[in-house]
Amino acid sequence: MPSNVAPAPGTGTSSAAGAEAVVPAEAVTPLIRGIAVLRRLTDADGVSSLSGLERSTGLARSTVDRITATLARRGYVRLDGRDAVLAPRLMELGNAYLAALRLPRLLDAHADALADELDESVSLAVGDQDGIRFIHQATRRRAMSLSFRIGDLLPAERTAPGPLFATEWGDREWARWHERRAADPEDRGFPAVPARSRPIEYGEDDRNDEKDRIGAHRTNRANRTNGKDLTVAQDPTVDRDLTVGKSLAADRPEEEPGAGRSARRLPTLGDDFEQRTAEAREVGWALDDQLIEPGLVALSMPVREAGRIACVVSVVSHTSRHTAADLRDTLLPRLREAVAAMERELREAQHAESATPTPRATAAPSGLAVWTGASKQELGREFIESLARGLTVITAFGEGRAELNLTEVAQATGLARATARRALITLEHLGYVTAHDRVFRLTPRVLGLGFPPLSRTSLAEIAAPHLTELSQRLHDSVSLAVLTGDEIQYTGRVSTSRVMSVHITIGTRLPAYPTALGRVMLADLPEPPLTELLPLTPRTITDPARLTAVLDRVREEGYALVDEELEVGLRSVAVPVRERGGRVVAAVNVAMHSSRRTPEECVAEVLPELRAAVGRIEEDLWVAGRFRRVPRT
């Protein structure tokens, strides 16, 4: 499998080489500027004022306005007053990379199972130049829990996966790492981690541990067979050979005497990275002992495919639960088993693909020309066609389309070859694609376009702007709810300001059976709970057989209309919200006083608008949930 490290200039981090790269003459300037806006929004955690974008990008305000208008038309941002907000649809760019990579589809379930078994957070990461970027997070929910997100970029030297990826670096990669360290001494180019400012401190206990470690290391080296190193699997003592993350004594600075206790200091975090890489190469695993921030420890092992590191799996914990040494001693055997299972999964997938070769998949033409034409007609000069076209090129890649040549990109997008070529040149210059033998691949840097802040978006957050728009169109209260047992719980709500209106707060729970929200969710269950059907009003259905027939009709028609069964005077119509697999995960309703509309008017006037709004919610949900679990609340 080709390396995930993107060699193009300007990728991964703010290296000096990337910053000084000459812009190709054929590069598309609007695409460069549009991506700059998306990156600034990502760094701002997904929201920024338009004036803030003007300052952070150095672009003219009129240019920022045109870019955000184009991105909003594409569905990648939402304009909320004077703010630009990243929208879930933007995740289709990162999804294209993850689909082409294959690893999430094949390995996510293994990582999730390991996290459940160990009750610790587990992550998968790929190399991104001199950094590492997460492609999956299975996080435990605790008061002290991991806050990293899919797409977050970390400096390699301050992580456990970093030394493992660095074992495959050459002179060029090491030179780039040194340049970046010199140009960014505090890791300001990595917003996901605290600044690199505190020194590493080693005290007396560390030195005693180190003496034991060095003695074991030397003993093991003397016991090598015929002068050849044993593999990790063959050598039962390798677990305690080295405490990865601390350099050998011979490579440490001299001790500085102190009052009552001597201590030695390295100038800053990560200065021992080359030594940690040498150790990781020998033992086949690596530790992060609070290199990112105090309390955070991690144990990592590489997952290999065709002899190369495809990704690195990490078990992450807190020092309140495990020390770094304890994490290694306790969990390394189980981590090895998980890695072996992952590598077996990759081999089997490769064998299946080789046994049944299929023509390279090509995406259906995207209809871009029609869409851009209509957008240009509607927005006029505010719509930047070359920006929209350039971003569409990224979506040409995907599962079965990891490598595409120019002709295939043009066919998948419907663009002219010359237009697709200029977009690819621009994306290669920016580090989002690599080219080899006239074949293009996406790089991990694509995940930096909005994926980190959006990867934690909940269903309620996805639905919120759509609920607001629907309420404004109908002038009625709109709600989102999920099913919890035999009750519904409101997770999203937009109320009207009428004298007579429905007032329910987020978090409110109501019985499911007498509500429209509850019935569309109960109808999706094979055996809905229909016990304790109490008469809340004279019209409440309390007969189980009759309610079962109602649910059958709801399932067939795709909506529920409840008239004064929960409360006298309250009428409501609801439709279900479905995830990618078709399962109902929530419901949206429009509620009103019965004097506002007749039941027939609800079906004729409200239901079409409600279904359209839910359709837009589902489109965003399906994009956001392709490679992650979207929290319902």
Image (cartoon, grey):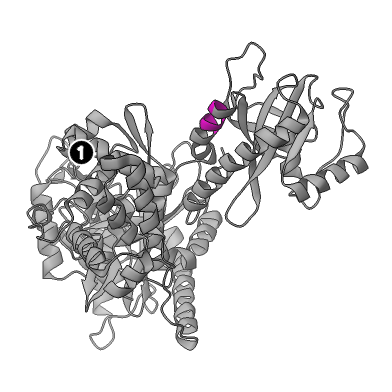
Give the quadrant of the N terminus.
bottom left
Image point (41%, 58%), residue name? 95
Q: Is residue 211 left or right of residue 323?
A: left
Please indicate, yes or no, whether residue 534 appears anywhere in the rendered image: yes
Front one among 253 and 525: 525
Decide: is 50 above or below 134: above
The verdict on residue 402 being magenta is no
Q: Quadrant of residue 589?
A: top right
Q: Is residue 345 left or right of residue 611?
A: left
Q: Position of residue 313 (x, y in %)?
A: 40, 62
Say few, some or many: other residues with alpha carbon within 10 Å of mark 1 (under 14 / 14 to 19 / 20 or more). some
The verdict on residue 470 being magenta is yes
Decide: is 420 above or below 246: below
Image point (51%, 64%), residue name? 110
Image point (57%, 55%), residue name? 580
| Residue of label 1 | 63
Give the quadrant of the C terminus.
top right
Decide: is 210 above or below 555: below
Instruction: Name the main secondary structure of what is drawn in magenta.
Output: helix
Q: Position of residue 232 (x, y in %)?
A: 36, 75
Q: Quadrant of residue 474?
A: top right
Front one among 12 and 258: 12
Type of residue at label 1?
Answer: Thr
Q: Is residue 11 left or right of residue 243?
A: left
Please indicate, yes or no, whether residue 251 appears anywhere in the rendered image: no
Q: Position of residue 29 (x, y in %)?
A: 16, 51
Q: Position of residue 540 (x, y in %)?
A: 86, 28
Q: Quadrant of residue 170?
A: bottom left
**Which residues fall within the magenta stretch?**
467-472
Front one among 239 and 274: 274
Q: Residue furthest top?
A: 499
User: Callout 1: helix, strand or loop?
Assistant: helix
